[in-house]
Amino acid sequence: MPTIHFITYNGETHSVVGAEGASVMSVAQQNNVPGIDGDCGGVCACATCHVYVDPDWSDRVGGRGDQEDSMLTFSPILRDNSRLSCQIAVREELDGLVLHLPEGQH
């Protein structure tokens, strides 16, 4: 099963293992990763699971969909590598994925 590394704004790393097909958000919640709230339950209706994809992983993770892009436009801390973790599916090729949490998400 793939391992995902969440790095908080303060530099603390939380490494978790997730089942393929699960959302990165649900894996974070199951493992009590701070800063991944997922208030909408993972239906892309909020931005409380906002992450920054490490540049080394951007191509493998892929880009935002239209609904995700629309939700993120409301974020004052939007970056080119911003994603909603509810919209990233855990896959074997993402083993070792590094995601950074924005400031204020803890």
Image (cartoon, rainbow, N blue to C red):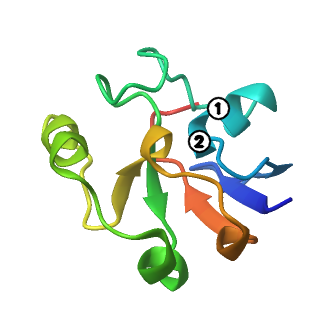
The residue lying at 73 percent from left, 59 percent from top is 5
- Residue 23 numbered mark, or none: 2
- Residue at image position (64%, 55%) is 90
Q: Is residue 90 above or below residue 84?
A: below
* Residue closer to the observer: 59 or 20: 20
Q: Under tag 2, what secondary structure? A: loop
Out of 101 and 67, give the one closest to the viewer: 67
Pinpoint residue 46: horizontal percent, then vertical percent. 31, 24
- The residue singled out by tag 1 in the image is 26
Location of residue 69 with respect to 37 vertically, above or below: below
Q: CA distance from mark 1 to mark 2?
A: 5 Å
Left or right of 43, for residue 20: right
Which of the pair 42/39 is nearer the observer?
A: 42
> In this view, which residue lies farthest toward the front?
21
Q: Is residue 100 above or below residue 94?
A: above
Q: Are marks 1 and 2 in contact (CB under 8 Å)?
A: yes
Residue plotted at (58% across, 32% down): 35
Closer-to-camera residue (32/63) = 63
Instruction: Specify the quadrant that holds the C terminus.
Output: top right
